[in-house]
Image: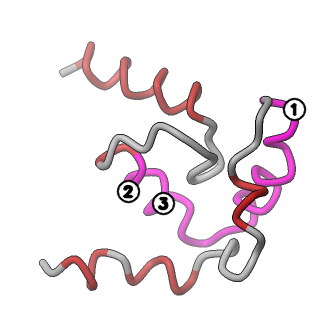
Amino acid sequence: MSVARNLVWRQQAACRGVDSKIFYPLTEEEAQEAKFICAQCTVRKACTEYAMRNYERNGVWGGMTERERRRIFRQRRQSA
């Protein structure tokens, strides 16, 4: 599958056109605005999986902060 096809979900993302700074908060509390946008997004799962597959270390992806994604990543490794 081509890279372009794998990223089609981005065209439908609720964050499209939103200032990207919102998705790179300095604290967990600042992440709430990004999480609110993600909560309304129809492609949230695809976004989360993209971040997990590509080891995105920064920002809110699919409504999850770096810390939350690391926790899920560890759980997946342990259950594998």
Tell which tag, 1 or 3, sits nearer the viewer.
1
Is 41 situated above or below 11?
above
Quadrant (top left, top right, bottom left, bottom right) of the N terminus: bottom left
Q: Quadrant of residue 77?
A: top left
Looking at the picture, how far across and down is residue 29, in whole percent?
Answer: 87, 32
Q: Determine contact: label 1, label 3, CB under 8 Å.
A: no
Query: Disc 3 designates what residue?
Result: 47
The kind of residue on which mark 3 rests is Cys
Amino acid bearing label 1: Glu
Contact between marks 2 and 3 (CB within 8 A): the answer is: yes
Say left or right for 69 vs 60.
Answer: left
In the displayed orientation, state which residue is furthest to the left. 1
Question: Is 43 above or below relative to 50?
Answer: below
Q: Position of residue 7 (x, y in %)?
A: 36, 77
Name the residue that disc number 2 marks: 50
Residue 18 vertical placement versus 29 (above, below): below
How far apart are the two marked residues, 1 and 3, measured between alpha carbons? Answer: 21 Å
**Residue 67 drawn at (x, y percent):** 58, 25
- Residue under the image location 47 percent in, 51 percent down: 48
Q: Residue at x 50, y 33 (%)?
A: 69
Residues at marks 2 and 1, CA–CA distance in whole angstroms: 24 Å
